[in-house]
Image (cartoon, grey):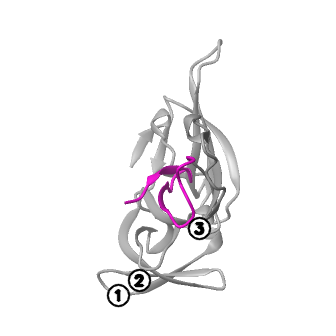
């Protein structure tokens, strides 16, 4: 599907220079001279190389149409993550390099959407948030709760996140999977 160059959004997959690229970051730029353009940081889906490209609104790019299929995360072995199609029960594997930082949020039995292009798995879409247990954090100092300062905590997946002072060890917290930030304490 053709889209204007200024309609690219982060996460979009486009066909450019004979390859598939995912838009990582975008920045609208209006120079003093000449027309406005969109500065896009692209990451090649196959090789993982990054490139910055400028797209003007007059240009069109081919947006790749990805098929999204529901899968369930089963297990990880030697850097390979196995997922099962919830309809056909077929299993596919994605490497740790394919998943990048998303791998740290995977939990046994988690439902995800695998993005497919022409039958090949490219990546996955995680739920917006996950619940993780706090395994290590500093104790609350009396009177410190009046200040709006956060403290570091280590979660059950090994990730470090800043949490409010009232969060203690063994508390479950909701973490945003997009940027890895604390959202709220889980019930």
Find out whether the residues at labels 2 and 1 contact each other: C-beta distance under 8 Å: yes
* Crowd rating for badge 2 (residues with CA inside 10 Å; few <14, some 14–19, many 20+): many
Q: Which of marks 2 and 3 is nearer the N terminus?
A: 2
Which image quadrant is residue 147 in?
Answer: top right
Residue 93 in view, yes or no: yes
* Crowd rating for badge 1 (residues with CA inside 10 Å; few <14, some 14–19, many 20+): few
Residue 42 lies, in percent from the top left, at 62, 48
Spatial distance from mark 3 to mark 1, Cα to Cα?
A: 24 Å
Spatial distance from mark 2 to mark 3, Cα to Cα?
A: 18 Å
Q: Given the current orientation, which residue lies at the most extreme left position?
A: 87
Q: Which mark is residue 115?
A: none
Which element carries disc 2, helix, strand or loop? Answer: strand
Spatial distance from mark 2 to mark 1, Cα to Cα?
A: 6 Å
Q: Which of marks 3 and 1 is nearer the N terminus?
A: 1
Residue sitting at 41 percent across and 79 percent down?
A: 109
Residue 24 lies, in percent from the top left, at 58, 48
Which element carries disc 1, helix, strand or loop? Answer: loop
Residue 77 lies, in percent from the top left, at 61, 87
Residue 8 lies, in percent from the top left, at 48, 40
Residue at the disc numbered 1: 89
Residue at the disc numbered 3: 104
């Amino acid at each position: 599907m053709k889209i204007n160059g200024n309609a690219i959004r982060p996460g979009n997959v486009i066909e450019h220079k004979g390859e598939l690229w995912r838009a990582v970051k975008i920045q609208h730029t209006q120079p003093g001279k000449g027309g406005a353009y969109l500065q896009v940081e692209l990451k090649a889906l196959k090789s993982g190389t990054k490139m910055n490209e400028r797209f003007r609104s007059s240009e069109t790019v081919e947006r790749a149409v990805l098929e999204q299929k529901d899968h369930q995360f089963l297990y990880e072995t030697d850097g390979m993550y196995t997922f099962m199609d919830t309809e056909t029960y077929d299993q596919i594997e994605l490497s740790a390099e394919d998943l990048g930082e998303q791998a740290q949020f995977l939990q046994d039995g988690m439902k995800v959407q695998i993005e497919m292009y022409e039958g090949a798995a490219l990546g996955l879409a995680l739920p917006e948030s996950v619940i993780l247990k706090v395994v290590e954090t500093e104790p609350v100092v009396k009177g410190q709760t009046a200040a709006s300062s956060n403290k570091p905590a280590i979660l059950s997946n090994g990730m470090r996140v800043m949490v409010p002072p009232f969060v203690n060890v063994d508390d479950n917290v909701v973490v945003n999977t997009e940027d890895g930030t604390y959202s709220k304490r889980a019930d």
